[in-house]
Image (spheres, grey):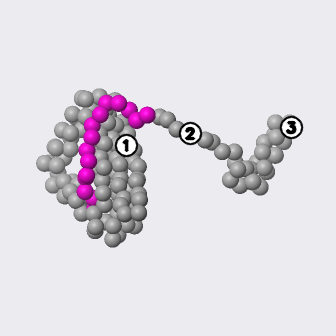
Amino acid sequence: MLYLGYTFEPTDYALGRLDEFWNWMMKREPWFYRGLNMVRGTSWRVERNESSIRIHHLVEFDNAASLTEYRRALAVKGIEDPAWEARRVEQDTWYTIVARTAYASPPVRMGIQRTYAPDEFMPEQGQAAAHRSAERTTA
């Protein structure tokens, strides 16, 4: 596996229109990755503190050939489809890429993962569901 990592910071324009920015971001990902089947997956993480927002984006590939194919496909789209390229560079209005990384080691899957019983969130509904389930198993 190979990973491309990008760190974005919203522009002042985006910060003044955060609802519009997040809407644009959510629509952009499916548009951008449509037809790029060499991309195995993507993930996002937002880091926010009192004074800034950073968006971390990870793009996964099976191997170096897939990454090369991806880069080639983007170059071809940019040259052969002026409307696609114009939409792609809209990103400069919305964010600045402040860091790029490429690496072959996967993210570490560490940490506590908990699952919760339904009654921990909605006690009445969870208990009723558990009661109905018990009735079905004894009937």
* Amino acid type shown at disc 1: Thr
Quadrant location, the C terminus: top right
With 82 as the anchor, is 107 left or right in this view?
Answer: right
Name the residue that disc number 2 marks. 112
Query: From the viewer's perspective, is residue 4 above or below residue 128?
Result: above
Q: Quadrant of residue 62?
A: top left
Lower sequence index among marks 2 and 1: 1
Q: What span is in magenta?
A: 94-108
Which residue corresponds to the image point at 35% horizontal and 69% vertical from the top-left?
17
- Residue 2, above or below 120: above
> Which residue is denoted by mark 1 in the rendering?
42
Q: CA distance from mark 1 to mark 3?
A: 47 Å
Q: Amino acid at mark 3?
A: Ala
Mark 1, other Cα within 10 Å: few <14 / some 14–19 / many ≥20: some
Cα separation between marks 2 and 1: 22 Å
The secondary element bearing badge 2 is classed as loop
- State whether the magenta stretch is mostly helix, strand or loop: strand
Residue at point 21%, 34% (across, down)? 68
Residue position for label 3: 139
